[in-house]
Image (cartoon, rainbow, N blue to C red):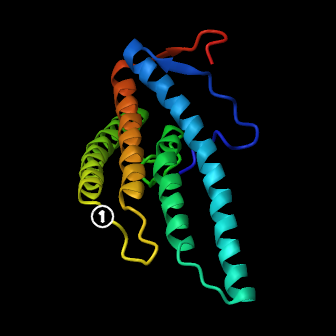
Amino acid sequence: MSHGFEMPGAAPARPAVPASPPVAWLAAALEKFHKLAVFLGMIALVVTSCILTYSVVVRYFFHHPTDWQDEASVFMLVGVIFLCSAYVQSLRGHIGIEALAGFLSPVANRVRMFIVDLVSFIFCAFFAWKSWTLFHEAWVDGQTTSSTFAPPLWIPYSMMALGMTVLTLQLLVQVLVRITGTVEAKEGAQ
């Protein structure tokens, strides 16, 4: 879904912050988390590519299979996907269908976006709750994968639960901002 802000010559949007102080605080905290998550995600992607390259080289040239690389890579990719999903949502960068946007009035589009954010918030809140129950179950029962490497399953479940919780909070901020509005950011407040 394209909003045009990435287009050459597009006017930069004036920075705005949520009008409600608690919502503004939560949005600022999420923004700090997003920066950390994206930084860690970049590192995890580089490490994952190194692990997979090492695995291919070792198998091909030395005929020595590794049993840990697939799960380590998948665990890191799970972390990257879930921990960075809220950042993508903050940019409204997730895939969306814009067929209706061109037909609806600006007011109807705002209502549509509010309903989409609200339904997404409800879904993600449920998903986060179920993710935390999976994490708890894996932690308490000591669940591991079925491979010979057998890493604990609480690792990807914890990243999934944390990522879905942060995504839920990001959607909550977007819903509350639609309700309470925004104000122009003060000079030097970014």
Q: Residue at x 68, y 58 (%)?
A: 46
Q: Given the image, on which type of amino acid does mark 1 rest?
A: Gln
For this orientation, the residue located farthest to the bottom is 63
Decide: is 5 above or below 15: below
Residue 12 location, quadrant: top right
Q: Residue at x 57, y 14 (%)?
A: 185
Q: Residue drawn 50% across and 37% down?
A: 90
Please say if 13 is above or below 112: above
Q: Secondary structure at mark 1?
A: loop
In this image, 89 relative to 43: left or right?
left
Q: Does residue 90 appear in this view? A: yes
Percent across and percent down for residue 71 are 49, 69
**Percent of width and height locating residue 76:** 53, 58
* Residue 104 seen in the current view: no
Disc 1 crowd, CA 10 A, few/some/many (<14, 14-19, 20+): some
Name the residue located 69 percent from the left edge and 65 percent from the top edge: 50
Question: On the image, numbered disc 1 is attached to which residue?
Answer: 143
Quarter occupied by residue 177: top left
Q: Position of residue 36 (x, y in %)?
A: 58, 37
12 on left or right of 16: right
Query: Residue 57: percent from the left, percent from the top?
Result: 73, 80
Indicate the quadrant containing the C terminus: top left, top right, bottom left or bottom right.
top right
Instruction: Out of 151 and 110, give the one closest to the viewer.
Output: 151
Q: Is residue 76 above or below residue 165?
A: below
Q: Is residue 26 above or below residue 45?
A: above
